[in-house]
Image (tube, grey):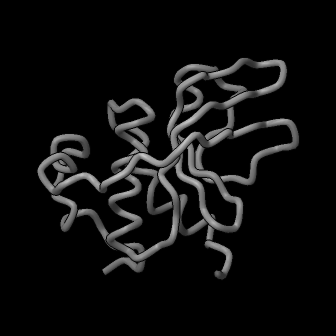
């Protein structure tokens, strides 16, 4: 598996950051788009521990095979010092997966969460 293009994915996903979603909804929306683009990933649920910042006992995020994490909602609970976007976690930052979110969301749920049809969200290659 080749490493993902963090910059390209970050730019592609950036418009989603304004959605009024918590970590589970955001993770499901992003996962649906990644599945549409055939990008390998895991939609994880578990715990997040940040040294000197705090812990989230129940959290959701995207994990890529190369170790990159996609988390747009840790700051909602842990403030500005929490990681945000796509990144390799810093030493000491622990994303502890307890499992995966399961089945992808259906198109109707995507529309409710994202405010648009999944087919209307631009593709990663801009088409």
Observer-nearest residue: 15 or 76? 76
- Pick the quarter of the image with the N terminus: bottom right
- Pick the quarter of the image with the C terminus: bottom left
Please give left or right for residue 78 compared with residue 125 in the image: right
- Work out whether 113 lies above or below 121: above
Q: Position of residue 67 (x, y in %)?
A: 71, 60
Q: Position of residue 97 (x, y in %)?
A: 61, 42
Please give left or right for residue 108 compared with residue 86 in the image: left
Q: Position of residue 3 (x, y in %)?
A: 68, 75
At 50% from the left edge and 38% from the top edge, which residue is drawn? Answer: 60
- Work out whether 119 lies above or below 27: below
Which residue lies most toward the front here? 98
Which residue lies most toward the left here? 108
- Work out whether 102 lies above or below 34: above
- Work out whether 49 lies above or below 7: above
At 19% from the left edge and 68% from the top edge, which residue is drawn? Answer: 119
- The image quarter containing residue 18 is top left
- The image quarter containing residue 123 is bottom left
């Amino acid at each position: 598996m080749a490493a993902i293009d963090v910059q390209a994915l970050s730019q592609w996903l950036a418009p989603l950051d304004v959605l009024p979603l918590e970590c589970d909804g955001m993770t499901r929306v992003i996962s649906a788009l990644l599945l549409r683009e055939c990008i390998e990933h895991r939609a994880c649920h578990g715990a997040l521990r940040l040294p000197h910042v705090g812990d989230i006992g129940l959290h959701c995020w995207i994990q890529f095979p190369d170790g990159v994490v996609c988390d747009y909602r840790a700051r909602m609970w842990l403030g500005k010092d929490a990681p945000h976007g796509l990144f390799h976690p810093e030493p000491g930052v622990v994303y502890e997966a307890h499992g995966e979110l399961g089945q992808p969301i259906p198109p109707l749920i995507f529309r409710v969460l994202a405010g648009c049809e999944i087919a209307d969200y631009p593709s990663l290659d801009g088409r």
